[in-house]
């Protein structure tokens, strides 16, 4: 990822952040009448056929090899089942602001973890500092008072933290699968995410006895279509274009989305602390997105990449914008 982010990269990143950032609002509505794990299953059931349709429109397809399906299973677990389940369950036990703070740790997690697994990612103090500054901005934007109740939300915090941690590992893993296009990844994510969560939902909840109202049904439809199917398809495009570390900027903008929507749609007036927080988030994002010094991968890694590239289908080339 030895290049600067261009306007198209930022547009994709911010669009993805807008869709995923709206996720929390609608999940909060849905879980008032739909059990959390069941709601996570429903969103995958709604999203899977849409992702499959987008995959076919872009000329991609599901893998025909055992290794390809194994890769989709891990993507489904790391970026589907664990995050969806953790978010839905955790939303019942923590404040929404705390969720925003927890997801704000993703740039820090990515800066630390990505270089351990990816040759093209390198650890830089500037990116780590950017992640810390961005997290400070999120806390200031949401309000430091949210942290005062942290001791009463330990279990909810621990479970919810699995979501950003798993997402980060999933983004790193996605970078190691150049033969899978973003639409294929999103489709496999929904298929296996739902398959993993479905038996859990029947084990701990009673999905067939639920009778949600129109509000909850509408909310889960929005989550499934816009905040999951379209958003996750874009998210894998973002990972492919700008790398695992910089794609972790997406959740940094979640609280920004919430604040801007509140100001625009509801006419809410922001305190001075909110503007300072927004400035810190922007500064942190610019630092994390900075172009890093060139890093030449080991000879054996480079040769493996060349050999793998020769066997990739030509239709994948459109997605490989490194």
Image (spheres, grey):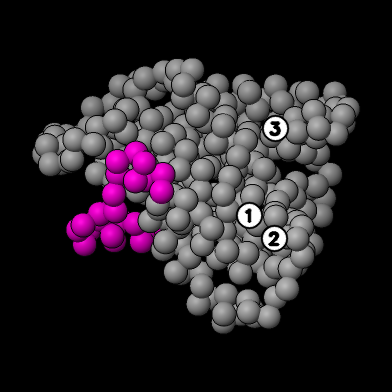
For the residue carrying disc 1, how many other residues have a C-alpha within 10 Å: few (<14), some (14-19), or many (20+)? some
Query: Could you tell me if the residues under marks 3 and 1 are in contact, i.e. CB atoms within 8 Å?
Result: no
* Residue at 80% from the left image edge and 28% from the top image edge: 264
Left or right of 32? Residue 36 is: left
Disc 3 to disc 1, how far (Cα)?
23 Å
The circle drawn on residue 221 is 1
Q: Is residue 118 magenta?
A: no
> Disc 3 designates what residue?
256
- Asked whether the viewer can see residue 311, the reply is yes
Left or right of 229? Residue 210 is: right
Mark 3 lies on a secondary structure that is helix
Tag count? 3
Left or right of 244? Residue 212 is: right
- Taking depth in this image into account, of 98 and 309 the one nearest to the observer is 309
- Taking depth in this image into account, of 45 and 238 the one nearest to the observer is 45
The main secondary structure of the magenta stretch is helix
For the residue carrying disc 3, how many other residues have a C-alpha within 10 Å: few (<14), some (14-19), or many (20+)? many
Disc 3 to disc 2, how far (Cα)?
26 Å
> Disc 2 designates what residue?
217
Disc 2 to disc 1, how far (Cα)?
6 Å
Q: Which residues are magenta?
A: 53-78
User: Residue 71: where, in percent of width, then height?
Assistant: 30, 56
The circle drawn on residue 109 is none
Q: Nearer the viewer, mark 3 or mark 1?
A: 1
User: Residue 174: where, in percent of width, then height?
Assistant: 36, 46
Query: Could you tell me if the residues under marks 2 and 1 are in contact, i.e. CB atoms within 8 Å?
Result: yes
Q: Quadrant of residue 295?
A: top left
User: Residue 260: where, in percent of width, then height?
Assistant: 75, 30
Q: Is residue 54 magenta?
A: yes
User: Residue 13: where, in percent of width, then height?
Assistant: 52, 31
Among numbered discs 3 and 2, the one appearing first in the sequence: 2
Seen in the picture, residue 200 relative to 281 is either above or below; the reply is: below
């Amino acid at each position: 990822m030895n290049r600067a982010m261009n306007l198209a990269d930022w547009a994709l990143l911010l669009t993805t952040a807008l869709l995923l950032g709206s996720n929390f609002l609608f999940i909060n509505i849905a879980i008032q009448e739909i059990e959390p794990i069941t709601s996570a299953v429903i969103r995958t059931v709604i999203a899977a056929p849409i992702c499959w349709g987008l995959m076919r429109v872009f000329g991609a397809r599901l893998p025909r090899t055992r290794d390809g399906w194994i890769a989709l299973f891990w993507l489904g677990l790391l970026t589907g089942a664990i995050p969806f389940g953790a978010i839905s369950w955790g939303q019942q036990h923590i404040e929404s602001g705390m969720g925003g703070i927890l997801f704000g740790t993703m740039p820090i997690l990515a800066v630390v973890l990505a270089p351990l697994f990816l040759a093209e990612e390198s650890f830089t103090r500037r990116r780590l500092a950017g992640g810390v500054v961005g997290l400070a901005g999120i806390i200031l934007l949401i309000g430091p008072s949210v942290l005062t109740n942290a001791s009463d939300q330990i279990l909810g915090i621990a479970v919810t933290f699995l979501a950003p941690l798993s997402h980060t590992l999933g983004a790193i893993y996605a970078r190691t699968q150049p033969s899978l296009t973003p639409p294929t990844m999103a489709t496999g994510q929904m298929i296996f995410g739902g398959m993993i969560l479905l038996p859990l939902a029947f084990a701990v909840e009673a999905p067939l006895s639920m009778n949600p109202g129109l509000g909850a049904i509408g909310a889960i439809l929005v989550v499934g279509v816009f905040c999951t199917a379209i958003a996750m398809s874009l998210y894998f495009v973002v990972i492919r274009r700008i790398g695992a570390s910089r794609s972790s900027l997406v959740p940094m903008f979640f609280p920004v989305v919430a604040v801007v929507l509140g100001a625009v749609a509801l006419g809410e007036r922001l305190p001075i602390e909110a503007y300072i927080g927004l400035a810190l988030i922007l500064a942190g994002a610019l630092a994390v997105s900075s172009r890093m010094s060139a890093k030449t991968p080991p000879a054996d890694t480079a040769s493996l990449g060349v050999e793998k590239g020769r066997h990739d289908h030509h239709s994948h080339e459109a997605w490989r914008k490194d």
